[in-house]
Image (cartoon, helix red, strand yellow):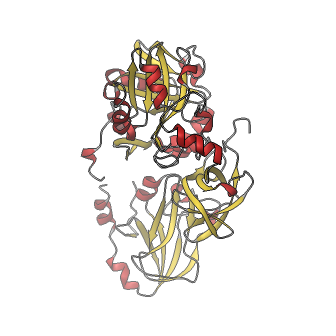
Amino acid sequence: MTASASLRQTPLHALHVAAGAKMVPFGGWEMPVYYSSIIEEHHAVRHHAGLFDISHMGEFIVAGPAAEATLNRLLTNDLRRLALGQAQYTLLCNERGGIIDDLIIYRLEPDRFLLIVNASNIAADLAWIQRHIPVENQSDQTAAVALQGPEAAKLLGIDLPHFHIGRFRLFGLECRVARTGYTGEDGFEILCSNADAARLWSELLARGAKPCGLGARDTLRLEMCYPLHGHDITETTTPLEAGLGRFVALDKGEFVGRDVLLAQKQKGVSRRLVAFKMVEKSPPPRQHYRLLANGRAIGEVTSGAPSPSLGIGIGMGYVESGMAAAGTTIEVDIRGKPFAAVIETKPLWKKTT
Amino acid sequence: MSVPANLRYTKTHEWVRVEGDTAVVGITDHAQKELTDIVYVEPPPVGDNVEAGKECAVVESVKAASDIYAPVSGEVIEANTSLGNKPELVNQDPYGQGWLFKVKMSDPLQVEELLRPDEYANLTGE
């Protein structure tokens, strides 16, 4: 895609451009990849507070007496365990157990759910879910920002437990606030109307949050080993292969993909999504680079980057199950040269270190 | 953005400073700003012959690996070893301490085919 005319813009687009952000295509949208420096923005989130425009993401409402039971047959986690006002990470799978999308679902009312889905999957998710139950797609009317970092709570000054959602009045604006995120730091995802987005953004910046682009969002989530759909998880990889088994409630009864996932659970998977760290200074690992063991191909990188927090190249990729144990030494084929890496437990970046 | 008058440029955003029959090569201020956060530089091995217009080095930012094209043909006689520990010099001082490598030119007339500062400035819209 080259024509920016075909890319959609969020309600904050003009503010990003005015701030000098570098804009890139992402999931059909023109989004800021950084304002001045990915590394600076990354550290702002790890040590202070950063603000991301996530208005490109999709928001669906599914409601009614059939909502819980129907969604529980479409999603892998057990929705019955989700209390009022709580958030749950879950997966939307096809019959083969492949991941159509990963998302966070919130119980707004006993029989009213909010689903926040990946921008690039809005159409696919909508088509899939609507085969079973009507969906109110609020994506076009909803703006969203993520305020992330150890200073986020102090900056926002609201009382909301982790992984919960509630309605708040912020700077005079009606918002829905969830204490969730994609960075590994404490933080909030704040939904508001398109018309209020610029005001919300500016107020949060005025209180000291640093504007951050998708570049830092990517390095932050990769250090935490949060998968990115379309890269680390796809319609041809399953939650068990991706190490997301704890979000799959095989015991909850029938749901789409359960037969395949149950069989995988019983027989074991042939490949696993692992996290790795380069042993020495090297060019950063990147998506599609081959992973080797003593020169033999065992898999491929699905996400890779220089880690600003660890100061070395990191990545995730699928390898043969026999090579997936933490501590296993592998190599990354970078432009024809093997560079040593070691498989690590997830997350790669641990808060206490 | 800065486009020094004493250098020549390529459409692929490399610069050349001529010192006798040697060409000092780097990437432009425009290029380093576009890339940002340079974290790794892989210069061509000293002794290798590079060919004008062909990729010969890699500069890596947080987001991506970018090929660097040789502005002129010749033998690589030196690489900037400081970049091994301080690749950010390319961001901080692209025309000075952030130089990438030096080529002993096999055909110094190739320099005449490179962009003049005003032509490069027009290209980048500055």
> Where, quadrant-wise, is the C terminus of chain B in this rendering?
bottom left
Asked whether, in this view, residue A271 is left or right of residue A353, the answer is left
The answer to whether residue A42 shows anywhere in this view is yes
Residue B70 picture location, percent across and down: 44, 75
Does any portion of residue A226 appear in the rendered image? no
Q: Residue at x 29, y 43 (%)?
A: A7
The quarter of the picture where residue A138 lies is top left
In which image quadrant can residue B116 be found? bottom left
**Up/down of A42 relative to A149, above or below:** below
Q: x, y (%) of residue B52? A: 40, 79
Q: Where is residue B104 in the image (x, y as percent from the top left)?
A: 50, 83
Question: A70 or A61, which lies in front?
Answer: A70
Tag count = 0
Q: Nearer the viewer, residue A219 or A47?
A: A219
Q: Where is residue A166 in the image (x, y as percent from the top left)?
A: 49, 15
In the image, is A40 to the left or to the right of A109?
right
Most extreme residue toward the left, as rendered? A5
Relative to A274, A286 lies left or right: left
Q: In this view, does A97 lie above or below B7?
A: above
Q: Residue at x 37, y 35 (%)?
A: A128
In this rendered view, identify the residue nearer to me: A206 or B7.
A206
In this view of the protein, which residue sits in the foreground, A134 or A222?
A134
Identified at 48% across, 71% down, the residue is B25
**Vertically, is B107 above or below A85?**
below
